[in-house]
Amino acid sequence: MRQLIEKGLMFSNLFEVRSAALVERYGRALKHLTGRETALTDFHIDISGYSPEIGDELGDDTYLNPNGCNRQFILLSTKQKSAPLLNGTFSTSYGILRQFIDENEAQIFALTARDAVAGELVNSVMSVTDPARLFKIRKVEIEADTTQNHVADAAELMKKIEQFQTRNDAWWDDDLIGEMIGLARVSGDITRNPVSLKNSSFRQDNFYTSHFGGIYIFRDVSAPAAIRVASKGDESALPIATVYQFGDRDGMAQFLAKNHLVESIVSARNLNAAALLRQRLDFILVDTAASAGEDLAGMTRMELRRAARRHLEALPPEYQALSDLLRSLKDGSDWPEIAAEHPAYFYTLRAAQTKDRDLVNMLLAELSPMDVRQLFICHKQAFYRAYRGWSDVKKSYVANFLAEEYSVDKAGARAALFGPEPGMEDVSPEPAPAPRSRARRAAEIPRVAPEEIIRRVGPWGAVGRSS
């Protein structure tokens, strides 16, 4: 993983904790939350305050995520919101933390000037001992305060101020006045500088969890279902009517289409489908050439294709199907028949613009793993697992590609691939065509005439439109 770390593709954008004041505040919060201590005086933390260096020191990567269920967090600065979330077990955790920081940014900025803010993402269960318990999680609440209870003391002081203002005899209550003075020494003048945090509650209906080999749970859709990544497991133990395994490609395709969660890359708006297909074909060539022992260092696209021609018999079926689709886009030749069972099918889809867009793209990335760029963007855990098993040649090529062509413009690459960021409200997209039945698959594949392609992107492709 060294190449990924050196190129900023792993453990990047972490918040550095070096000053004595920040180290002391972190140590106090760590003791407050976990009862544990660190001897380190220089380390990095993610958006939740988790430090890989401290995890290594303690021999416990879950020291802020006990049982992988109720994530604890330590905030030393609002700048942590630009850091990633490491070792996440739920796909929703990062978004919840980021929204909490955004909604309370001014208060957190003020509080972290003198103390750490520590808290927890509280689920409705304390642990996940079997898959069925995942379905008891419907809501996540955030509980947070400083280690010296500034927020709680401010709330208590506000109650006493209200009591003082409404009681006729409060001026002669020395005990009440003494309590107010004591609390004010800690919380400050809350009438001028209110101290409070909006401890929000978040729905968790559709999400991914890494527990039990990986499960995608979709409950807030018209046809609910769970999708299990691992091949083993008692499906009857899941309290939901429909459960798909990753091997049931036709079932998953029907589920995604029925709930309008996907769209064809050919008909998607603001997407250069031809460029995307060429890139995916290149990634397949890289995989084939690297497996054959080719040296990919510094190879251009033309040289890569020449190398792949020497190993035509080793090219997977995905390559031929996507090549046929690209050819049809370019010259209007016969549209290829790509059934849901075909290994290339999920490479032809992207998530529709709904509130679950990122979750669906995460699923599609895992179903089309040879597109290493999409896998890296949408499902880093799966990308890192796959990376460990690649040859050194492929590791080097992919790391260089991501560093040189993706990292330089992350926002632009995401917008070009997946469209604009979806809002929290549910967008009703055009229904995606259901996977073809064996009798009518060819009729249900969308066909785009050459003149329609020119109307969409201009006679010179995406270059003319983007310019």
Image: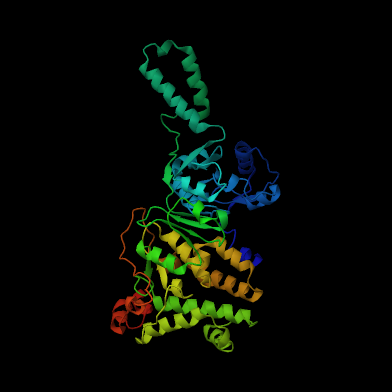
Above or below 132: residue 8: below
Q: Quadrant of the C terminus?
A: bottom left
Q: How many marks?
A: 0
Q: Residue furthest front?
A: 236
Q: How is the image coloured?
A: rainbow
Residue in the image at 58% along x and 77% along y? 287
Q: Based on the displayed image, in which of its 4 quarters is residue 388 positioned?
A: bottom right
Residue in the image at 42% along x and 45% along y? 202
Q: Is residue 65 visible?
A: no
Say which of 371 and 421 sits in front: 371
Q: Quadrant of the N terminus?
A: bottom right
Say which of 217 and 140 sits in front: 217
Above or below 78: residue 182: above
Say which of 182 and 288 sits in front: 288
Say which of 29 and 264 sits in front: 264
Above or below 392: residue 362: above
Q: Based on the displayed image, in which of its 4 quarters is residue 403 positioned?
A: bottom right
Above or below 452: residue 67: above
Q: Is residue 347 left or right of residue 129?
A: left
Q: Is residue 214 visible?
A: yes
Residue 193 drawn at (x, y percent): 43, 33
Residue 281 drawn at (x, y percent): 49, 79
Residue 64 drawn at (x, y percent): 60, 45
Residue in the image at 59% along x and 82% along y? 289
Residue 391 drawn at (x, y percent): 65, 74
Residue in the image at 57% along x and 79% along y? 286
